[in-house]
Image (cartoon, rainbow, N blue to C red):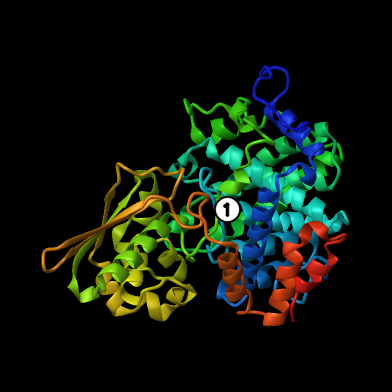
Amino acid sequence: MSAVLKPTQPANAATVADRLADFAVSFNLADVPAEVVQHARLCILDACGIALASGTFDFASAATAGIQALAESEGGYPVIGHEQTLPLRDAVLLNGILVHGLDYDDTHAGSVVHCTASAWPLALGAGLRADASGARALAAYVLAVECDARIGKLAEGRFQQRGHHPTGLVGTFGATIAAGYLSGLNAEQLARAQGVALSMAAGNLEFLSAGDWTKRMHPGWAGVCGLTAASLAGAGFLGPTTAYEGRHSLFNLHLGENHGVDPEQILMELGHAWELLDVAFKPYPACHFNHAFADCALALRSEHDLDPDQIASVTALIHPKQVNVVCEPEAAKRRPASAYEAQFSVHYLVAACLQRGRFTLEELAADAYEDPTILSLADRVHYREDPESTYPKHYCGALEIQLKDGRLLTHRQPVNRGARENPITTAEVTEKFMANATRAVSTQQAEKIAELVMGLDELKSLDPLAQALRTP
C-alpha cells in the first residue's frame, strides 16, 4: 500500500509529525480493510446511542446550558439529541461530552484512550463544515483513532500514573490531524498544526477526588483544540514540528525524565497494522478497568446461585497501575456519592452485580448506589495486586469470593468482553445502541440513525445523518 510508512527512515530525515502529516494528506478510505471500516461504523453507532442516552441525565443539561450561554446565535451544527444547533466548536465540545458522559463509550486498550468520543464529534462537525462525503468523514475518524492509539499506547498506562487523562491529552493530536485532513491542509501545515496542538492538549484525573464532572468534557475539548490548531496552522500560524521528540515535547513533559519512549514507534506499520481493531466496546456503563470484575461477579453469581448473605468477603485481583483509579481511597469507593463515583468503584460495581445480577444505567441511579444491601456487600469487597494481569493489553481481572461456610469461589476474566480477542457481536452492539437511543428518540428514528451510520461511507453528504441525530 503506497500510504504505508515504515520506521526505517532515519530519525533526522523528518520528524514524526512530518511523517504523520505525509500519511494523512494522502489517506483514502479505499486503502482501509473492510473489517476496519465495519468496526469503525459500529464504534460510531455505539457513540451516537450513548450520546442520545446522555441527554436524559443532569450533567448533559448543565453542559448544554453552559455552552449555549456562550453561543450568541445558532451556528448550524448539530448537537446529538437536540433540536437547537450551535457554532462548530461549541457543537463539537457538547457532542464530546454527550458521547463520553456516561462512561459507556469504547476504549482503545493499549493507549487507554476513549478514541471515538473525540474523533467522531470532530469528524461530524468538521465534515459538515467541509461539505465532506460520508466516506471522507469516516476516513477522518479512522485517522484520528489510529493516531490517538499509536501515540497513547507508547505511554503504557503511565499518563494516568502521573495524573493525566489520556483521552483529553492524546485525543487532541488525533483530532488535529483529522481536522487538518478535512480542511485540506498540506503536509507542512498539518505537521505544524500538531505543534500548535501540543500547547493545548490537556486532561487530568482530579475528578476522581469527589466524582466531579470534568472528565466528561475532555474528549470534546480535544476536538475543539484540534479544530483550532488546524485552523491556525492553515492560516500560516507556526507551530513546532517536533511535538513528539523535541526537548519540551509530549512525552518529555508528561512522563518526566528517563521515560524510555521512542516516538518513532508511533509510525510502526502505520497504514498496515490497524489499531482501530483494538478499540473495545463496553458492555457495562462503568470505567473499563472494572469490566472484568463485573464479568467475574456475574459468572460466579450465576454458576453458584449465590445469595449475597452467604458471602464473607470478596477480593478483586487487579493490576497496580489501575488501583489509584478504581480502588483507592477505599472508604470513598465503598460509599459512592454520585453516579460517577459509582462507575469508578470496583467495590460498588462488584457488590451491585452480586446483589442485582446486572450492571446497567439503572445501577447509576441514587436508589442503587444508596441501597443499603449493596453498600453492606461493598464493605466486604477488598482488592490486591494481580501478578498475572496483562494490563494495558487487556483489561483483565479476577475475583475470589470467600463464603461463610468456608468455600472459596474464584473466576478469572483474562480478556474483557468487547475486546478484539473476546468480541461482542454486531447484533449486540446494535442492541446496545437501540436500548440507549430509545431513551431519547422513537424506535423509528433510532432505526433511521442506525441505517445512516452503517451506510456512512455511501452518503454523498453528512446532512441526512446530521438531521436524523437532532430531535425536539
For image coordinates 69% across by 76% down, the residue present is 446
Which amino acid type is marked by label 1?
His
For image coordinates 72% across by 31% down, the residue present is 4
Horizontally, is 6 left or right of 228 in the view? left
Horizontally, is 181 left or right of 438 in the view? right
Q: Find the residue positioned furthest to the left.
A: 405
Residue 296 position in % (x across, y down): 34, 61
Badge 1 density bin: few <14, some 14–19, many ≥20, Cα 10 Å: many
Q: Please name whichever residue, 2 or 266, is drawn nearer the observer in this view of the structure.
A: 2
Residue holding disc 1: 114
* 252 lies above or below 362: above
Residue 215 position in % (x across, y down): 54, 58
| Residue 294 appears in view | yes
Residue 216 position in % (x across, y down): 57, 61
Q: Quadrant of the C terminus?
A: bottom right
Residue 308 position in % (x across, y down): 24, 74
Quadrant of residue 389 within the rendered picture: top left
Q: Please name whichever residue, 271 or 115, is drawn nearer the observer in this view of the structure.
A: 271
For the residue labelled by badge 1, is the local secondary structure a helix, a strand or a loop?
A: loop
